[in-house]
Image (cartoon, helix red, strand yellow):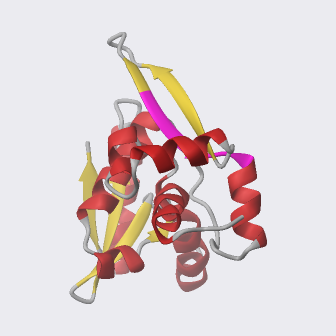
Amino acid sequence: MRVMKKDLEVYTLLTRTGHATRNQLLELTSQNRLKDITRKNYLKKTKTILENGEILVSYKLDELGKKSLEKERYIDGYYSARSPEHDIKLAEKYLSLNSVERDTWVIEQKNEVFLNRKFNDQMSMPDASYLKNGRRIFIEAITKHYSLAQIQEKYEFVDATNGTLEILE
């Protein structure tokens, strides 16, 4: 698999957020390149019917894309994709960051490994985090399926880490 710089930006976004919309991916690559890497089965196009009846089209890494990236050691770990609606909020936040902040983005699973060692506890982890001005900012994308108790757990976790929590609704 030959990975071009723009492709790596697309793959990195998807490994860190799970799903992204076509428009979000076009911020990183061309329409022709997006079609090409989808046609080659590195990306998978998905459709989700929202409660209002709208169809949400998104992309995620296909298994071939994951295997190729792992084999070439381009990517170290994947965010466990949730619902496209949830993940697209993360992608939007990720794309709003500057390149330095993007480079500090840590997925939930990596936060969990590090922070469970630190706190020796099974705390409810936010979806991701990044550094801004030397401070860890935790990100949690919520949908209407989240309970107040689940959201409160996120705040308790962040309080214990002296971080800041940003909720994406």
Is residue 115 located in the magenta-colored stretch of the structure?
no
Residue 141: tell me if it is visible. no
Q: Depth check: give the residue in front, 17 or 61.
A: 61
- The number of numbered badges drawn on the structure is 0
Left or right, residue 44 beside residue 52: right
Please state, as top left, top right, bottom left or bottom right, where the N terminus lies in the image: bottom right
Q: To which quarter of the image does residue 99 belong?
A: bottom left
Q: Residue at x 55, y 30 (%)?
A: 46
Q: Residue at x 59, y 42 (%)?
A: 38
Q: Depth check: give the residue in front, 153 or 79.
A: 79
Percent from the top left, x then y, of residue 157?
Answer: 40, 67
Q: To which quarter of the image does residue 118 belong?
A: bottom right
Q: Residue furthest front?
A: 32
Q: Depth check: give the residue in front, 43 or 90.
A: 43
Question: Does 149 appear above or below 115?
Answer: above
Question: Does 82 appear above or below 163?
Answer: above
Please state, as top left, top right, bottom left or bottom right, where the C terminus lies in the image: top left
Region rendered in magenta: 57-63
Left or right, residue 96 beside residue 7: left
Q: Depth check: give the residue in front, 120 or 81.
A: 81
Residue 110: tell me if it is visible. yes
Q: Residue at x 31, y 54 (%)?
A: 27
